[in-house]
């Protein structure tokens, strides 16, 4: 599989991965090996980032669209995410509330379904 696909499956930001990972196709067996026994660089990326936007959105409790509306277009590190959570700007408070309402509505619709 392409490195971008492998990075997405591992939940990491591809440009932060080692160059050989970025430039080499990954087999399913290699992907499984990375999941089962992650090398130090993978452990570090998962711990401290930078994280891809979908992971940042999840950590902040907002949608990816909410990140864009808040002006977050780049990958963030764990320190940057922590700072946003510790001192949430107005857009983050609003987007978290919007996301919570959307998830609640989706759950209600599933129950009715």
Image: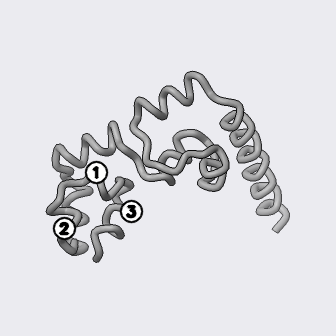
Residues 37 and 15: in front is 15
Eye-nearest disc, 1 or 3: 1
Marks 2/1 in contact by CB < 8 Å: the verdict is: no
The residue tagged with tag 1: helix, strand or loop? helix
Q: Which mark is residue 30?
A: 2
Q: Which residue is mark 3?
A: 8
Q: Residue at x 55, y 22 (%)?
A: 86
Pointer 3 local density, CA inside 10 Å: few below 14, some 14–19, many at least 20:
some
Is 44 left, or right, of 54 in this rendering?
left
Q: Residue at x 80, y 60 (%)?
A: 111
Q: In 3D space, how far apart are the residues under numbered discs 2 and 1 (Cα atoms)?
A: 19 Å
Q: Which mark is residue 16?
A: 1
Count of labels in the image:
3
Eye-nearest disc, 2 or 3: 3
Marks 2/3 in contact by CB < 8 Å: the verdict is: no
Earlier residue among tags 2 and 3: 3
Q: Residue at x 35, y 42 (%)?
A: 49
Quadrant location, the C terminus: bottom right
Quadrant position of residue 87: top right
Q: x, y (%) of residue 36?
A: 23, 55
Pointer 1 local density, CA inside 10 Å: few below 14, some 14–19, many at least 20:
some
**Whether residue 15 is situated above or below residue 50 in the rendered picture:** below
């Amino acid at each position: 599989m392409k490195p971008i696909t492998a990075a997405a499956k591992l939940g990491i930001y591809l440009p932060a991965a080692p160059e050989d990972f970025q430039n080499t196709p990954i087999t399913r067996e290699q992907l499984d090996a990375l999941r089962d026994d992650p090398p130090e660089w993978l452990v570090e990326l998962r711990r401290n980032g930078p994280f891809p936007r979908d992971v940042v959105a999840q950590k902040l409790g907002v949608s990816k669209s909410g990140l864009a509306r808040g002006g977050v277009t780049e990958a963030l590190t764990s320190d940057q995410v922590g700072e946003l959570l510790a001192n949430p700007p107005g857009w983050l408070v609003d987007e978290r509330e919007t996301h919570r309402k959307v998830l609640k509505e989706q759950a209600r619709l599933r129950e009715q379904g």
